[in-house]
Image: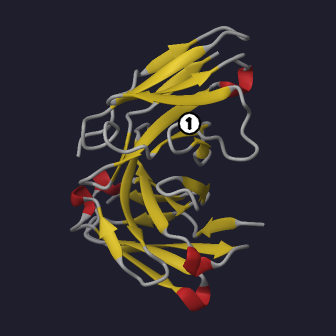
Amino acid sequence: QSALTQPASVSGSPGQSITISCTGISSDVGVHNYVSWYQQHPGKAPKLMIYDVSNRPSGVSNRFSGSKSGNAASLTISGLQPEDEADYYCTSYTSNSPWVFGGGTKVTV
Amino acid sequence: QVQLAQSGAEVKKPGDSVKVSCKASGYTFTNYAIHWVRQAPGQRLEWMGWINVGNGNTKSSQRFQAKVTITRDTSATTAYLELNSLTSEDTAIYYCARESEWFAAFDIWGQGTMVSVSS
């Protein structure tokens, strides 16, 4: 199972909005609504930010939002803040693997 | 407090095996699956496999099927990841993660265990 495709890096200025894409195939992102997003700061364990495409766990800022269209999911960070600088990974349940992560996106603020 | 506490860093030689532990606390251990995720230095996260803690059933990624054994001890509320026939390519941080009540999302993560393989 190949990794989901994410841009290697995305940057933005404080206060701006950025969107990270996560492209899969019909047997993963395209068919399941089990896409989640994780934030990872250097030297730290990942943190769940979005589950089931667009839901936020308790405690996660509402500046983070998720969506999906066809085989592609997206994570949008609005009102970008310095502490948002981190790596972001998408993951999807798949019909085969059964879980696959994206390649990761480095967000620079 | 819900948490997963992993065992400490390991340094191994090629051909060795290693067993990483993941001790759960603060919740009913048997109610949630545990997954294992690998991150080689500077690389992406890779899903390795999971265990249904309730019944002990496991499934591993095809990529790691021959490499890993996932087990659990319910009395010790601990899950284990064993890696065999280690090579330098197994040098990585290994994370355990709890699958949340929302299927297919990992809401609690261990701190990670660094396994270094070098002759």
Position of residue B12 measured from the top left corner of the image (x, y, whole percent): 39, 66
| Quadrant in the picture for residue B88 | bottom left
Looking at the image, residue A14 sits to the left or right of residue A102; the answer is right
Position of residue A3 measured from the top left corner of the image (x, y, whole percent): 30, 39
| Quadrant in the picture for residue A108 | top right
Disc 1 is placed on an element classified as: loop
Name the residue: 58% across, 67% down: B8
Q: Is residue B69 above or below residue B96?
A: below
Name the residue: 31% across, 42% down: A31
Q: Nearer the viewer, residue B59 or B20?
A: B59
Q: Residue furthest bottom?
A: B75
Looking at the image, residue B76 sits to the left or right of residue B14; the answer is right
The quarter of the picture where the C terminus of chain A appears is top right
Position of residue A67 measured from the top left corner of the image (x, y, whole percent): 50, 29
Q: Is residue B110 above or below residue A84?
A: below
Write down the residue under mark 1.
Answer: A54
- For badge 1, the amino acid type reads Ser
Position of residue B68 measured from the top left corner of the image (x, y, whole percent): 31, 69
Name the residue: 57% across, 15% down: A18
Q: Is residue A3 above or below residue A20?
A: below
Chain letter of disc 1 in the image: A
Q: Residues within 10 Å of mark 1 (few under 14, many from 20)?
A: many
